[in-house]
Image: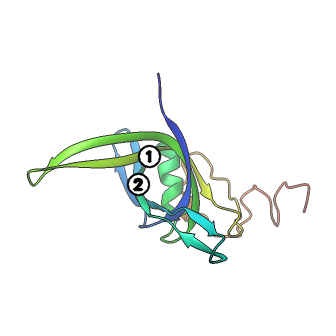
Amino acid sequence: MNDTLVTLVGNAATGVEFRETASGGMARFRFAVTPRRWDRGKQLWTDGHTSFFTVWAWRALALNLSGSVSVGEPLVVHGRLKVREEEREGRRKTFVDIEAVAVGHDLTRGTAAFRRVAKGENASTIPVGSPDGAGGPGGDDPWD
């Protein structure tokens, strides 16, 4: 199969919408990517045109996204590029989607604390900082 895999760096433009389906969880959110370039003449960073993508995720990734991502957070999204056309209100529109394989916070812009989720457990039910066996107080992390 010839998929086009892309990695995008940007910000969550909307909250994550999560739905349970017959085949498992499904989530989507809008993702904004704005290139920045150094303008030597002005000696400052300038923003380029912002592109928006709809990011889709299924099953465990969908569930974990719903408990981990909020509007405005910097993210790295890796997945399959999908371009589709639809007719709406008599006009052809083009949509660019990303079928996510992996999503994470952009650690060049902040810090994060990973919490492992047990199979079948919702990421949003684990309190931040809880001893869930993934390190931290009471965890099995040899660095503690």
User: In this view of the protein, which residue sits in the foreground, 16 or 49?
Assistant: 49
Amino acid on which disc 1 is placed: Ile
Residue annotated with mark 2: 53
Q: How is the image coloured?
A: rainbow
Amino acid on which disc 2 is placed: Phe
Q: Residue 5, how many percent across, how many down?
A: 52, 37
User: In this view of the protein, which residue sits in the foreground, 38 or 140?
Assistant: 38
Question: Picture quarter containing residue 23?
Answer: top left
Quadrant of the snapshot with the C terminus: bottom right
Question: Farthest left residue?
Answer: 90
Q: Is residue 112 left or right of residue 4?
A: right
Residue 101 seen in render: no
Q: Residue 114, how many percent across, how many down?
A: 70, 59
User: In this view of the protein, which residue sits in the foreground, 140 or 76?
Assistant: 76
* Residue 17 disc label: none
What secondary structure is found at the residue carrying circle 2?
strand
The residue shown at (47%, 71%) is: 71
Q: Few, some or many C-alpha atoms within 10 Å of disc 2 (few <14, some 14-19, many ≥20)?
A: some
What secondary structure is found at the residue carrying circle 1?
strand
Q: Is residue 110 left or right of residue 138?
A: left
The residue shown at (47%, 50%) is: 62
Q: Earlier in the sequence, mark 2 or mark 1?
A: 2
The residue shown at (67%, 77%) is: 43
Q: Does residue 67 lie above or below 88 as drawn?
A: below
Between the residue at mark 2 and the residue at mark 1, the CA separation in whole angstroms equals: 7 Å
Residue 118 seen in render: yes
* Residue 98 disc label: 1
Question: Farthest front residue?
Answer: 41
Q: Residue 102, how many percent across, how many down?
A: 57, 46
Q: Is residue 52 left or right of residue 87?
A: right
User: In this view of the protein, which residue sits in the foreground, 54 or 51?
Assistant: 51
Asked whether the beta carbons under mark 2 and mark 1 sit within 8 Å of each other, the answer is yes
